[in-house]
Amino acid sequence: MLKVFIALPSVMLASLLFAEVASAQSPTPARDWTTWGYDQERTGWNKGENSLTTDNVSGLSLLWKTQLSTPPRSIVLSTLTAPLVVEGVRTGEGVKNLLFLLGADDTVFALDADTGKVFWQKTFPNPATPLWPATWLCPNTVNDTPVIDKQDGIIFLITSDGKLRGLNLRDGADRMAPTDMIEPFARAWSLNLIGNVVYTSSGRGCGQLPEVQGAKPAVVPGSISAMDVSDLDHPLLTRFFTSGTRSAGPWGRGGVTRGPNGTVISQGADGLYDPASGNFGESVLRLSPMVKRLEDSFTPSNWQFLNARDLDLGSASPDVFPFQNRTLVAVAGKEGVLYLLDAAALGGGPPNHSTPLYKSPQLGNDAAEGRNPGQGVWGAITSYETADGKRFLFVPIWGPPSKNAPQFQSSGGAAPHGSIMAFQVSAEGDKVSLIPQWTSPDMTVPDPPVVANGVLFAIQTGEQTIQSPAYVHGTQDEINHNALSAKYRSTPVNNMVLFAFDAETGKQLYCSNKMITDWVHFSEPVVALGKVFVVSHDAHVYAFGLK
């Protein structure tokens, strides 16, 4: 039996008791990759991987390539989720390293990570008919990268019917009854498992509420959902709505991020900022475990400008990391400005909750353009600490750098289509700042990079970022605009390229050039078990490694 608790902003009703949520981290860093961004804090840093080094990564080659059965469609930009990798799964055929993905057709794939062969797959047909026609923003398909509980051997995922499912890693058998978690056809983002609670965020107004007296319901409000799965027979659902409309819904790639003491941190999208009315547009929120209440927030002082220009702060997800005597939160959005926040007092406290520890100069998006083309930061920031204690942040910038961007110690040259910017975190007393280090060569729309053993791996996605192609008013092109826009967005401007850089110096160590012919949307490279895994829009999975 499912128990449901709705946690609402201050003007809405909220009551019920909650089980305490325990949070724990493994003392030994894992070599595998069981959640988006590697860990609950979404750092993108695989602390246990040590096979690939700055000395040998230049020898990367394609080990295998596998075509999966999920059909690519122009209306669906994300054919496959980012991969997850689990080491040492005990199966009926012995111990195996498995790679997991979720396809847009509600198919879960488990591949042998060493050979690329499909080990098992399972499809969950959705019998419901969407009330709203598919668009590339709301394609009525799954989008959430699953999360893995390695200790209990379970992969958790949400299918397009809005149900949370838990499957055996070894064979895909059900471990829990499918349980409603979000609205059918909603746009959920990467799952996070903190303690015994599965979290996700959803936004964009995608999905459908039940019809009322035959009338189509209003759009689905943005939300953060938490499912306590400590008892798989009696899961407990809690939801926190970021507004009463489609506005403010979090849609950063990593979903929610683990904060101090088991809290969760999320970034909200465009929308009104009016806490008294339960609206949290353009804000970073810290919620208690099981999202039963709002604990703290940060809202940029220029939130009205961001909202007016479609410069969603919610275009990325937070990165949480320790630094000296603090826990810091790195956030950025389409505006192209990076903020460092104190996780204990996100916005400096009342009355305004709008004072960061640090605000960077403009890094990109001088035009303050939200969509045509998309510029600024989309995805997530990556953090990494060297053996001698230096903390780095890596920021994927879409479009050219700002004319007011800081001077970097090393530059990869002109980057009109995008780049990775590297910074070192610094502090003098209580004052925190960023020291510019290096920029990458030109990359056509980079995804969030990842780090392992001093090597930064990044992909050029090659995707088109202009959202609305021009048309003449009153013509057939205007009538067919939705289909034309989807086709336009799914036609790449370049191919996907895998890069490897020295994380400290920015020296380029590897480039796949034209080896991958297709493109990808909203993904990340995954480095685990001595390999780098990437997916493409045409439903291919690639594994690079040392022969």
Image (spheres, helix red, strand yellow):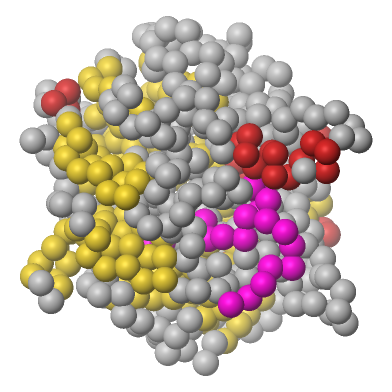
* Residue 62 covered by magenta stretch: no
* Residue 129 covered by magenta stretch: yes
Name the residue located 44 percent from the left edge and 21 percent from the top edge.
Answer: 443
Compared to residue 162, the image places residue 515 above or below, namely above
Q: Please state, as top left, top right, bottom left or bottom right, where the C terminus lies in the image.
A: top left
Name the residue nearer the viewer: 514 or 171.
514
Q: Quadrant of residue 50?
A: top left
Q: Quadrant of residue 303?
A: top right
Name the residue located 50 percent from the left edge and 68 percent from the top edge.
Answer: 159
Q: Position of residue 127 (x, y in %)?
A: 58, 77
Compared to residue 1, the image places residue 210 above or below, namely above
Q: Is residue 254 visible?
A: yes
* Residue at the limit of the structure toward the front, as seen here: 476
Q: Position of residue 271 (x, y in %)?
A: 77, 47
* Residue at the limit of the structure toward the right, as seen here: 474
Q: Is residue 503 visible?
A: no
Compared to residue 239, the image places residue 519 above or below, namely above
Q: Position of residue 259 (x, y in %)?
A: 47, 54
Q: Position of residue 128 (x, y in %)?
A: 63, 75
Name the residue located 20 percent from the left edge and 35 percent from the top edge.
Answer: 62
Name the residue located 33 percent from the left edge and 42 percent from the top edge.
Answer: 534
Which range of residues does the magenta coloring cover?
Answer: 127-148
